[in-house]
Amino acid sequence: MRDLLETFENKNKGKKFVCEHVYPELTAVCPTTELPDFYTLRLLYEPDEKIVELKSLKLYLTSYRNEGIYHEELINKIIEDLKAVIEPNWIFIELEVAVRGGISTSVRRFWDKNEGDDIERAIEGI
Amino acid sequence: MRDLLETFENKNKGKKFVCEHVYPELTAVCPTTELPDFYTLRLLYEPDEKIVELKSLKLYLTSYRNEGIYHEELINKIIEDLKAVIEPNWIFIELEVAVRGGISTSVRRFWDKNEGDDIERAIEGI
Amino acid sequence: MRDLLETFENKNKGKKFVCEHVYPELTAVCPTTELPDFYTLRLLYEPDEKIVELKSLKLYLTSYRNEGIYHEELINKIIEDLKAVIEPNWIFIELEVAVRGGISTSVRRFWDKNEGDDIERAIEGI
Amino acid sequence: MRDLLETFENKNKGKKFVCEHVYPELTAVCPTTELPDFYTLRLLYEPDEKIVELKSLKLYLTSYRNEGIYHEELINKIIEDLKAVIEPNWIFIELEVAVRGGISTSVRRFWDKNEGDDIERAIEGI
Amino acid sequence: MRDLLETFENKNKGKKFVCEHVYPELTAVCPTTELPDFYTLRLLYEPDEKIVELKSLKLYLTSYRNEGIYHEELINKIIEDLKAVIEPNWIFIELEVAVRGGISTSVRRFWDKNEGDDIERAIEGI
Amino acid sequence: MRDLLETFENKNKGKKFVCEHVYPELTAVCPTTELPDFYTLRLLYEPDEKIVELKSLKLYLTSYRNEGIYHEELINKIIEDLKAVIEPNWIFIELEVAVRGGISTSVRRFWDKNEGDDIERAIEGI
Amino acid sequence: MRDLLETFENKNKGKKFVCEHVYPELTAVCPTTELPDFYTLRLLYEPDEKIVELKSLKLYLTSYRNEGIYHEELINKIIEDLKAVIEPNWIFIELEVAVRGGISTSVRRFWDKNEGDDIERAIEGI
Amino acid sequence: MRDLLETFENKNKGKKFVCEHVYPELTAVCPTTELPDFYTLRLLYEPDEKIVELKSLKLYLTSYRNEGIYHEELINKIIEDLKAVIEPNWIFIELEVAVRGGISTSVRRFWDKNEGDDIERAIEGI
Amino acid sequence: MRDLLETFENKNKGKKFVCEHVYPELTAVCPTTELPDFYTLRLLYEPDEKIVELKSLKLYLTSYRNEGIYHEELINKIIEDLKAVIEPNWIFIELEVAVRGGISTSVRRFWDKNEGDDIERAIEGI
Amino acid sequence: MRDLLETFENKNKGKKFVCEHVYPELTAVCPTTELPDFYTLRLLYEPDEKIVELKSLKLYLTSYRNEGIYHEELINKIIEDLKAVIEPNWIFIELEVAVRGGISTSVRRFWDKNEGDDIERAIEGI
């Protein structure tokens, strides 16, 4: 799947800015029940040399449509793929999961190139 | 009740991330009036080696349905049970109580493995 | 009025947690115009050895119904009564006043057992 | 105009608390176009020895109705008048201006008796 | 385009205050698809000696209507133009982009005269 | 109480128009529990020869503050008083009662000079 | 259960008015899964000679807490019980069911003493 | 004031369509208290041969800024002026008045060239 | 797909009531772009002898996940399947489509056993 | 411009259903001020033999970007173009115009193949 992600050069390298993308149409399959899960993904990062190309991001996210994968694996797989491909200064992802059994769930992680995971930012949701 | 809680292994141990669950269908019984109380529970924690299994969490919470228990006891019992079973790095719980006598009430507590209770986070509701 | 407030023992003493009560039905009388004032009260505190009993809190607040009292006096009287009766680790009160003359007003104060008044928390409304 | 502002004694001097007033009916005249401008004023301060009397505040604000004055002058004039009359520990004002040319505008300033202007608080809008 | 921006003198120089403008009608053209992009621009700055004249700001922003330009270039071009013309103490811009392919996007940057770019403020959106 | 209501002459008699007043500060006392009840009153009518004077309406409504009266009696008493005093072409009242025991309640009635009560309009809440 | 319902005399018989009660704390048990179901009940009726006593209504609704019953049975049982006890001119009930399997469900019925069921009103939710 | 209103020719005469204008910045003076009143005006009409020119409408409405006039007079004066100047097929006006004494008020009238006043439409607010 | 739909007997046959289901997780594939489409389905019907079983409804809707089908075909296929399986007195479906190209779309149809399609109800969305 | 609109065959001809499209990105130029106008377009129609192709609808609407045209002309031109190209059973358009001079405006028209313009539906906005 990682191959679906494309980037273009950040022409404003050296300037520090934030890119945020929200995608309410992420869906995958629960490995246990084989029923679909629905997610709203929120992604923030600070580009270093590369910026993720938006259409490729959509195709990458769409490719999970028929994959069986748990919430915790999904967030970590997406974050690792984006780290590998865009090599950002830092990256944050939040997955909001649609209500199941009356419980609504979300998972959040923040990773920084120099400091590693930052649980404070994950708690606050940035 | 604690026996109802099940966990599975955190395969992303070493990565720091936050799990949040919101359950608006928690209900117990007021020991004084013997009338039902209704709660919205908000639970956040950082998994260490274990993640709470969602269906078992629901069954655990459902098991309070006919228990007589006060707000303050309830929040502390749930937090102690989850500490014992999932051994998280930290855990936060907020109980919002449905309006009674025109007063709406909530109770919040945050506990950290190393630092113990953190009243700052409880004040801010994380 | 202070006599109306009752408490019960905090069985979770030593655990730090926050109790929040919101009461949108507080009403008193303006000493100048003799017309009723309407308030939404927000009260937060950290219990030490005592917890305020909810029904007694309601009766206490209801007892202002026909009292002539200004906003600033009211907030300070309530906070001093609660300090005396529940001896909390800290207490915060916000009074939102219903619109008068097109102006909506609120008053806020935070007091801590060790540090006294904390204007920072009053500014932020906690 | 400053003469319209009246105060009364702060009987809770020594206690630190915050007074907030929101007035969505402030209007003045644009000196360039001679058309009316509409503002929502948000005012916060910590009283020292004096508290602004609410009715006089309304009359003071109403007195701008036919004055030609720019946004930046208006906020600074109001803040200077209130500083002079109520001598607060600190004061904050935000003026939200009604949409003009599709652009909505607001202006904010925070002043402290000891520290002078505090741009951090102005940025955050307190 | 930069020539379209006009300023007037800040008569309150020495006082620190914040000006905020929100413009939901910014539109440019996507260089790839040649279809229009729609933006909501949020601009904050602290004036030093100059304040941007509102009508000129609108005409400046309107001038992008038929320009082909990417999101990241657009935010950086606007920020550089405003830096050059109003020479503010600091400036912040957020561009919210209308949904494309189901993804909603925003870009944020904060620049300070003395400290340069501040990624913390960009993350928090001030 | 009815004596508190004052009217002034409808100078636009012959023109048909609707007057609507919403008062969220109505309060009376529950005869059973002796605790206060809180109501939002919505009143619509078509003036014939008389219009209710607003300040007198407020004083009239304020006079219920310490009266013991049930919801159904209250709505019918207010509607009969207003019928007697302003002799409208028709009148509609809705009383929304603040939540008690987890149940929120409202009561509605519509009366027309020629047709009497109109249950259809009461159902729809006009 | 029907025995739990109490009424009092409608002293305004002959006047046509509507009583509406909303209860977001109705819960029963799903006969198939044995898991709790959560409902928001909306009840409207026009009293004839009797009005339902509010506290008894709450106790009646609370008595379903541990009953196994399907949505369609529940709405029809409540409506038949209320018809029998308060003998209203007409009655309408809507049950909103909490989300299950991602589907939110509601059921509505309107019954009139003279006309029987009225599907139009049920469609429109009155 | 009526002279301020300008019209232009309806080039789509014979086609039936509705024009709606909402103006939240209408203000006049209360003749009794001499304090300003604030209104949101909602105006709908079906043009016959003439359409009201928008800038002239604004200037016309602005001209009430320092006029002493009651709510009921104001709505009827505006409707009569617009009837005289644009000669519409029908016209509807709603004036929402800012809260005074805790009471929010609105006044509505609908007039049709052939049928005269239509109280049904005034009740429903169209 | 139709085979996935299961029903159970309507034990309240003869009573007229409405069942409404809202499913925000419907997704299919656009035959042209082969990209996923996302829908919110709203379904209302009056049961005759059969009621649709909720879990089977979910499985039926889930089965469109990888089908290539246009909006207009989808709504008509679902309505025809449900007509065939539950034989309702009438049925209404609304499909809200997620924004594409900046345009949000919805499609609505109402069918009655005796009267056939009813465009009025489709316009109003019931 | 009309040539930009494309249609495809309605395969469900004979079934009556409604298509609704909302486009918040319509923009044209004011002929008087030469400044851009911004619109939200709402379009509903009942297809007869043809359905408008969505991408062509977007390109058609985009083509107004640099056209000088008044609100009333715009709505009527769009409605006439769509009538000519898709020959619907009926069509409704609402144009909401972005605030200018503090006034927000909208224009609405409904046309039916057999009955011509229907002002009732235009008033109600369908």
Image (cartoon, coloured by chain):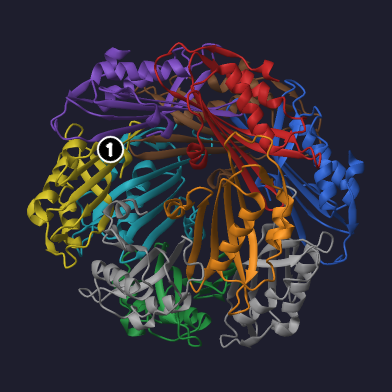
Chain colours: A brown, B cyan, C green, E blue, G yellow, H orange, I purple, J red
- Please state which of residues J113 and I82 is positioned toward the viewer in this rendering: J113
On the picture, is E91 further left or further right than C14?
right
Looking at numbered disc 1 in the image, what kind of residue is underneath it? Glu
Q: Which residue is mark 1?
A: G120
Q: Outermost residue, left direction?
A: G3
Measured along the vertical axis of the image, is residue B37 above or below residue I35?
below
- Please state which of residues J32 and A78 is positioned toward the viewer in this rendering: J32
- Please state which of residues E49 and J106 is positioned toward the viewer in this rendering: J106
Q: Which chain contains the residue that carries disc 1?
A: G
Q: Which residue: 19% across, 51% down?
A: B66
Secondary structure beneath dot 1 equals: helix
- Please state which of residues C12 and J11 is positioned toward the viewer in this rendering: J11
The picture quadrant where one finds residue G73 is top left
Which x, y percent locates residue I18? 26, 35
On the picture, is G121 further left or further right than I125?
left
Mark 1 is surrounded, within 10 Å at the Cα level, by few (under 14), some (14 to 19) or many (20 or more) other residues, namely some
Q: Outermost residue, right direction?
A: E3
Classify the position of the N terminus of chain E by image quarter.
top right
Which x, y percent locates residue J78? 64, 27
Callout count: 1
